[in-house]
Amino acid sequence: MDKYQVLIVEDDKDTANFFDLVFNLLGFRCLKVHSAESALSALENLLPDMILLDLHLDHPYSGEQILLKVRADKRFDATRVVVITAYPVMARAVTDLADLVLIKPVDVEQLKLLTGRLLGMEIRPRQYFFRDPITDLFNQEFFHTRLEHAFERSKRRADFHYGVVLLAINVETETAKTIPSPVLKQIYKWVAEQLRGIFRPTDTLAHFEGNQFASLHEELKHPEDIEIIVQRMREALSRPCIVADQEYVIYPSIGAATNNNLDQHADDVFNAALQAMKAASQLDSFSQA
């Protein structure tokens, strides 16, 4: 098994050392990190065969957010993720994302048996269940799942702020009124790449049907920070998109909203952002007329 590499993400150093010892005895190559930030940094250049992931990590990021990053990135299609937690309730939220969930305490024989079976299984990436096939961003269903999680976190933490941004992408060209579908797909891919470049790894960026995109931004320091994000989006999409030597001008209609104490459902923030986007779209249409 010496060909396998394991990334151990565990903030308790004694537990991390235990896992490291076990996997080294099994012939794995291991890298230990003790925070979500260190894990995200390591994953920029590392392609582990397996990630042993503790869900309950210190702020600002959680183990769940690391799992989301892994599942959203095609580089990790063959990476197995074993979630280890002492909190069964937390595990329920990620059952569909993890290859295996273990409840602490975990003994040596259990870890050896289950991970051995896991690495021998056929690779069937879970990413495909919630990835948009055009842009490789999250799809609408998964976005709303993440939004539900953010809403639940906001009920547990008074200092937890999150925001939703919705974008409708309008495209203009000087040579054609109707843009062929294959060209639109290339434009949407271009939009996705521009937006990826300005977001944090823990932000949730999604492509809905047609010309609509959405983003979820958790752990905002201040609710007003959502306006900074909107401005960055406008700047990222301000230059023309070029497809097959043809220039296309992008006009995004953007609406944003943040959570507040009056929210009763996760969709309250989404609907507020949707209304803001519709208002922006009408204003943009009037300005271009």
Image (cartoon, rainbow, N blue to C red):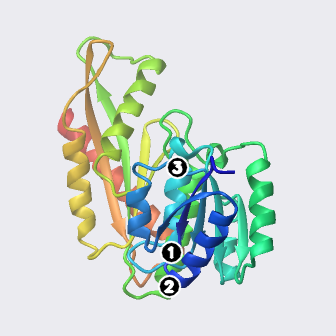
Image height of 279 relative to 266, above or below: above
Secondary structure of the residue carrying numbered label 1: helix
Look at mark 2 in the image and give the residue it sits on.
Answer: 155
What amino acid is at disc 1?
A: Phe
Residue position for label 1? 151
Q: Earlier in the sequence, mark 2 or mark 3?
A: 3
Name the element at disc 2.
Answer: helix
Percent across and percent down for residue 112 are 76, 66
Towards the viewer: 193 or 43: 43
Q: CA distance from mark 2 to mark 3?
A: 26 Å
Q: Which of the 4 image quarters holds residue 223?
A: bottom left
Pointers 2 and 1 in contact (C-beta within 8 Å): yes
| Location of residue 180 with respect to 84 vertically, above or below | above
On the picture, is 59 further left or further right than 232?
right
Residue at (22, 46) in percent of width and height:
234
Q: Which residue is mark 3?
A: 72
Give the residue displayed 38% in from the left and 75% down from the top.
60
Residue 27: x %, y % from top left? 66, 57
Task: Say which residue appears at 46% left-offset and 81% top-offset.
Answer: 154
Work out how far the residue at label 3 is from the one at label 1, CA to CA, in angstroms: 21 Å
User: Judging from the image, what secondary structure is the residue with disc 3 in?
Assistant: helix
Q: Residues within 10 Å of mark 1 (few under 14, many from 20)?
A: many
Please state which of residues 258 and 222 is positioned toward the viewer in this rendering. Answer: 222
> Mark 3 or mark 1: which comes first in sequence?
3
Res. 202 visible in picture:
no
Q: Check disc 2 and give the amino acid type.
A: Lys
Q: Is residue 76 left or right of residue 154?
A: right
Q: Which mark is residue 69?
A: none
Mark in front: 3 vs 1: 3
Query: Alpha carbon of mark 2 to alpha carbon of mark 1: how far?
Result: 7 Å
In the foreground, 18 or 56: 18
